[in-house]
Image (spheres, coloured by chain):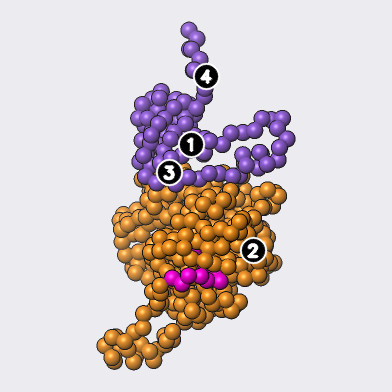
Chain colours: A purple, B orange
Amino acid sequence: MLRIDCPCCGPRDHDEFRYGGDASVIRPAHDDADFEAWYRYVFVRENPAGAHREHWQHVLGCRQWLIVERDTRNHSIASVALARKSPPRKQSR
Amino acid sequence: MRRYSALSILRNGLAGHRHWQRAWRAPEPKRSYDVIIVGGGGHGLATAFYLAENHGIRNVAVIEKGYVGGGNVGRNTTVIRSNYLLDGNTQFYEFSMKLWEGLTHALNFNVMFSQRGQVVTAHSADQLDFFSHRANVMRLNGIDADILSRDDVRRLVPYLDYSDTARFPIHGAILQGRAGTARHDAVAWGYARAADGHGVDIIQNCEVTGFLRDGEKIVGVETARGPIAAGKVGLAVAGHTSVLGHKAGLELPIESHVLQAFVTEPLKPMVDHVVAYGADHFYVSQSDKGGLVFGGNLDGYNSYAQRGNLGVVREVAEAAIALMPCISRVRLLRHWGGVMDMTPDASPIICPTPIDGLYLNGGWCYGGFKATPASGWCFAHTIATGKPHPLNAAYSLDRFRTGRTLDEAGVGPFAWLQ
C-alpha cells in the first residue's frame, strides 16, 4: 500500500484517496483561444520515470485535494501538500 | 534455421537431444542496418519478421534492453479476441485474429493458440442490448458473435453464480467462439526464431540510450554497446514509450500505469472458456497447467514499477468471488504487474512520427498481446513504405489533435480510467 501523509488527517492508506493525475498540467485561461494550449492540456503528458507531481483527493477523509510528489519507479513519496494556494477558511462558530 | 517437425523430434530424441540448433543467434551488432527496431517484445519481433517476410527487408536489428520474452509479452493474461465496436479497431483486431489462426504454421513454432471462446456476461436487459449492438457490428464485419440467454450461459458455464443471492444476477452473455488464448512465451520465441531465420539480428541485453541525428533526421541509435546507424528506426517499447520518446523529442499523449495479473494453484479442468464479468472488471481463463489466470483493473496511478498494490488484489478477488463463488477457497500462487502505455482513448498508436526517420508503435494499454501479429504486420508496412497500412490508418498520433479518437470505453481523456 502507498501511505499518503495527509496534512489534515495524518498518514492514511491510499485506498482512501482518489487519483487526479499529473499536477504539473495547468488549465489554460477560459478565454485562451490557442488550440495548441488546449490540446496539450487535455492530452500531452510528461509521464516521467521518476519524480512525479500528482493530484490526489482524500475522498474518504477530509476531502481535500492534495499535491503529492512521488517517484513512479518505487512509489516513495517526497512531499504532500494541500493543492489550493489559499489557507483553509476558518470554521464559523 | 532448421525446421521443427515430428521427424526432427524423433531424430533428436534418438540422438539424446544433443544436436538441437539454438533457436536464434546471439550476433555482434553490425555498424549499420536498414531498419532498427527498438524493443524485442512481441510487437518488435513481429515487426522484424514481417519486414523480412512481407517486404524483403532483411538487414534489420531488434535491440532489446533485457531478454526476449522478459517484458509485457511474457507478463500478460494471453487473451485473444476481436470483439471491438468502433471502426478502425474492429477490422484491425479481426485481421489479427486471422493471423493468429495461421500463426503456428507461419512461424513453424507451436504458439498453442486455443480458440476456446470468450463469454462476457451481461447483468441487465440494457447491457444485453448493448452487447447485441456490439454483436451486430461484429457480424457486419464478418466476425463471429452470438448472444446467449441466461439459460444458454448456464449450460455453457455452469460454475458461475446463478443463485438468488448473486450480487449482479446474470441476464445473458455475448460469446465469441473464435476467441481464446495462446502461449505467450511461445509467441515471443516463435517470432524471434522466425525473424532470425530471415537474417534479422536480435541483440539482447543492450539498452538504447539515445538517438543519432543528422540535422533533424534520426539516423541511428546510441546503445550500451556503442552507436549503430540505421536508415529507419522503429520504436516498439510499449510501457516505456514516453521514456524513449522524450529522448527523440516526441510529445506523447501517454501515461504509464501498472496492470496486475494473477495465477491460482492448479485445479482440475473447470474453466473451458475465457470468461469476463460484465458487472465489474474481471476476466479468467484456465492455463494448461490448471491454474486460473485472471486480471482486473489498473492500479490507477502513474507507475513504472512492475509490481502492484494490495488494494487491487482485494478488488479483483471480490469481483472473482461475486461471479464465481466456487473459487473462494482457492489460493493464489503468484501475482505480478506489467507497465502499460495508457493512451487517452485506450487505442494504440502505429504511425510515422513528425521526426524524419522515426516510426512509433506504442500506446497498447492492456490490449497489446492479442494485437501482436497485426501490429507487427502493420508496423512493418508503415516502416517499409513510409505510410500507414489501411488497417492502422486510424491509429495515428495526430488523432488526438484532429478529434478522431477511438474511445472504445467512452470515459474521456483520463488514462487511468480506461
> Which secondary structure, mark 1?
strand
Structural crowding at the residue carrying mark 2, measured as other residues with C-alpha within 10 Å and reported as few (<14), some (14–19) or many (≥20): many
Q: Quadrant of the N terminus of chain B?
A: bottom left
Residue matched to label 1: A54
- Report if residue B38 lies within the magenta region: yes
Q: Which residue is mark 3?
A: A50
Q: Say if B344 sits above or below A3 in the image.
A: below
Residue A86's disc is 4
Residue name at image x 40 percent, y 67 percent = B204
The x, y position of residue B261, in whole percent, is 40, 56
Name the front one of labels 2 and 3.
3
Question: Which residue type carries mark 4?
Answer: Ser
Q: How far is the residue under mark 2 from the one under mark 4? A: 48 Å
**Residue located 36% across and 80% down the image:** B22
Q: How far from the left and from the top, in percent, is residue A93?
A: 48, 7
The answer to whether marks 2 and 3 mark residues whose Cβ atoms lie closer than 8 Å is no
Element on which disc 2 rests: helix
Q: Return the chain for callout 4.
A: A
Residue B340 location, x and y as percent?
48, 53
Residues shaded magenta: B29-40
User: In this orientation, does residue B158 appear?
Assistant: no
Identify the chain of the residue marked 1, using the numbered disc in the image: A
- Label 4 and label 3 in one chain: yes
Q: Marks 1 and 3, Cα distance to the nearest angstrom?
A: 12 Å
**Residue type at mark 1?**
Glu
- The residue furthest left is B16
Q: Secondary structure at mark 4?
A: loop
Left or right, residue B322 beside residue B247: left
Amino acid under label 2?
Asn
The CA span between labels 4 and 1 is 19 Å
Q: Nearer the viewer, mark 4 or mark 3?
A: 3
